[in-house]
Image: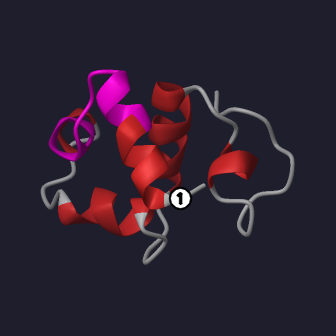
């Protein structure tokens, strides 16, 4: 999935990168941005995004996940 589609999905759901970082107690919100843009990996951030935008991890990051469905 394109980073802009991920960001749009987050906005539609009422979430920002800052809000995700705060909910996961991540001090540096750039971590969330790096995950969205596939520069870094964080299972916690990836799962949170998957839940928020209601999309399987494999559709958001197909290179990283095979068909594993949505995060639990």
Expressed as whole percent of the image width and height from the top left, the position of residue 61 reads 65, 59
Q: Is residue 15 within the magenta segment? A: yes
Left or right, 72 with reference to 20: right
Left or right, 39 with reference to 43: left
Mark 1 Cα shell of 10 Å, populated few (<14), some (14-19), many (≥20): few
The segment highlighted magenta reads 9-20
Mark 1 residue element:
loop
Mark 1 — residue? 2
Can you say which quadrant of the picture contains the N terminus? Answer: bottom right
Q: In the orientation shown, which residue stands out farthest toward the bottom?
A: 39
Q: Is residue 11 within the magenta segment? A: yes
Q: Residue at x 36, y 21 (%)?
A: 13
Left or right, 40 with reference to 14: right
Q: Residue at x 46, y 40 (%)?
A: 49
Q: In the orientation shown, which residue stands out farthest toward the top?
A: 13
Name the image quarter holding residue 27.
Answer: bottom left
Q: In the orientation shown, which residue stands out farthest toward the right?
A: 67
Name the image quarter holding residue 8.
Answer: top left
Q: Residue at x 19, y 35 (%)?
A: 19
Residue 9 vertical position relative to residue 43 in the rendered view, above or below? above
Expressed as whole percent of the image width and height from the top left, the position of residue 21 reads 23, 45
Q: Residue at x 55, y 37 (%)?
A: 50
Total marks shown come to: 1
Q: What type of secondary structure mainly makes up the magenta span?
A: helix
Which colour assignment does the render follow?
Answer: secondary structure
Can you say which quadrant of the picture contains the C terminus? Answer: top right
Expressed as whole percent of the image width and height from the top left, the position of residue 32 reads 31, 57
Residue 52 vertical position relative to residue 1 in the rendered view, above or below? above
Expressed as whole percent of the image width and height from the top left, the position of residue 59 reads 71, 48
């Amino acid at each position: 999935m394109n980073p802009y589609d991920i960001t749009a999905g987050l906005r539609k759901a009422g979430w920002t990168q800052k809000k995700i970082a705060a909910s996961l107690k991540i001090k540096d919100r750039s971590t969330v941005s790096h995950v969205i843009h596939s520069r870094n990996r964080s299972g916690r951030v990836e799962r949170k995004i998957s839940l928020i935008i209601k999309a399987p991890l494999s559709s958001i990051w197909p290179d990283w996940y095979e068909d594993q469905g949505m995060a639990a």
